Image (spheres, rainbow, N blue to C red):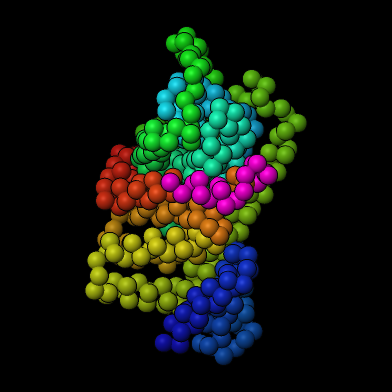
Amino acid sequence: MESLFLGICGILMLIVLLLMGVYIAVALAFVGFGGTIALYLMRSGDFSRSFTMGASLLNSTFFTTASEYTFVVLPLFILMGLLAAEGGLSYAGYATLSKWVGGLPGGLGIATIGAQTGFGTCTGSSLVTSLVFTKVSAPEMIRYGYSKKFTYGLISAGGSIGMLVPPSVLAVIYALLANESVGKLLIGGVGPGFTLAMLFSIGIIIMAKVNPTLAPPVKRVYSWREKLIAIKDIWTIFVVAFLVIGGIMLGVFTATEAGAVGSSIVLVVGLVTRKLAINFLPRILREAAESTAMVFLIFISAQLFSRFLSLSGASKAVMIGISELNISPLMIVLGFVLLYFILGMFLDGPSMLATTVPIVHPIVVNLGLDPIWFAMTAIMAIECGLLTPPVGLNVYAVKGAAGSDISLEDIFRGSFPFFLIMILNLALIFIFPEIATFLPSLTVK
C-alpha cells in the first residue's frame, strides 16, 4: 500500500513540476529516479543501497533505450524531413497543385492542403509543415486576395496532416513508448490523414462559396500541357510516399529501413537537381542530431518514469480502477481525448505522449480496444490541441514565420473553422475505426 501511495505522489509531483514550467524530460527523469530511490528506501531502509538501485535503473534505462535498433527510425525520419524542407519539395508540390486546382473555389487553399499532405509524407512533422508553407503558399494566396486570417488559419490546421500520414514522428514515438509495431502505426495514419485532407478541401470550397471574399477565384487558366509538365516537379514526393507506405505495407522493408531509403532518395535527388548543396549538409545533420537528442531525452525519461510507476504498482492500480468503473470503454476513451485537448493547451505532442502513454495504453489494451485505433485517435486529439490557445504550437509556428503580417489572435480565429473540421475527422475515426485500422490489417510487418 505504501508503494502505491508513492506512485500516486509521483504522478502528482510530475503534474506540479509541469505546472511550474520544468522541462518535461527533466520532470519525468526527476520523478522516475527520485521515486525509485524512495521505493527501495522504504523497503530496505538503507539509503546507500537504495541510491545504488535507483542509479542502476537510471543507467540501464538510458543504455537499453538509446541502443535499441528499432529507435533508429526516429532520427532517419527527422533527417528525411529536414532534407525535404531544404530541397524545395514544398514549393514544387504547391506550384504543381495550384495549376491543377487553382481555378476551383478556394483553389489555392486546396492546393496548399494537397501540398501539405504530400510534403507530410516526407517530413512527418506538423510544425515543420506549417512553418514551411507559411513561407511557400501564404504570399501567393494573399497576392490573389485571400483573407489573411483564412490563409494563415488554413496553413496552421493543414500542418496537422503532416503528423498523421507516414512518416509521422508522433506515431513512431507512440509505437516506441507502447511497444507496438512502428510499421503498423505509421500505416494507420494514412486513412485519417487523407480523410482530413479531403474534409479540409470540402470545407474550403464551402467557405469560399459562402463568402467569396475569403478566397476569391483565380482567373488564370492553365492548359493540359502545362498541368502535365508540372507533374514532373513532384515525382520525388510520389516515389518517397510509395516507398515508405508501400514498402512497409508489402513487407519489403521495415519502418527503419523505409526511413533510410526515403532519406537517401531525397538526399540524392536534391544533390543531383542542385536544390541541395553539399555545404548545407553539416547544418542539416546537426539539426537532425539536435532534434533527435531532444526527443530521445524525453522518450528515455518517460521510460524511467514508466518503470517507476510499474514498480510502485500505480499503473496496475489505475488500470484496475478504471476497468472497474461502471461506464463503457468508449466513454473512457472520450475522457482520454478530452485529456489530450487540455494538455494540448500547455504541452507539445511528444511531451503529451511521454506523460500519458505509459498510463493510458495499458488501460486501452486491458479494455480490449484496438491499440492502433486508439493511437490514431490520440494523435488526432493531440493535433486538435495544437490549434488551441494559450499554446497552440502550430499557430505559434505560423506566427513566427509570418512575423508582423498578422496577429496571433487573428491566426487563432482563422484556424477555428478548420479546428471544427478536425473535430469532425476525430469523430469519424471514433465512429468508424476502420479508417485507421483497415490498412494496418493488410500490412505484412
In this picture, which residue range is highlighted in magenta?
A: 400-417
Q: Within the magenta stretch, is there residue 415?
A: yes
| Residue 197, percent from left and from top | 41, 37
Q: Main secondary structure of the magenta part?
A: helix
429 left or right of 93 in image:
left
Q: Please report the residue visible at 59 percent of the width from the left and 77 percent of the height from the top.
A: 34
| Residue 93, percent from left and from top | 52, 27
Quadrant in which residue 281 is drawn: top right
The residue nearer to you, when weighing 324 against 208, is: 208
231 left or right of 50 in image:
left
Q: Is residue 414 visible?
A: yes
140 left or right of 383 in image:
right
Residue 365 versus residue 152 in the image, above or below: below
Check the picture and name the quadrant holding the N terminus: bottom left
The residue most toward the bottom is: 45
| Residue 274, percent from left and from top | 67, 21
Q: Please report the residue visible at 57 percent of the width from the left and 52 percent of the height from the top.
A: 409
Quadrant in which residue 328 is drawn: bottom left
Q: Is residue 347 visible?
A: no
Check the picture and name the quadrant holding the C terminus: top left
> How many numbered dots are placed on residues in this image?
0
| Residue 28, percent from left and from top | 57, 68
Q: Please report the residue visible at 67 percent of the width from the left and 27 percent of the height from the top.
A: 276
The residue nearer to you, when weighing 256 against 245, is: 245
The residue nearer to you, when weighing 379 against 157, is: 157
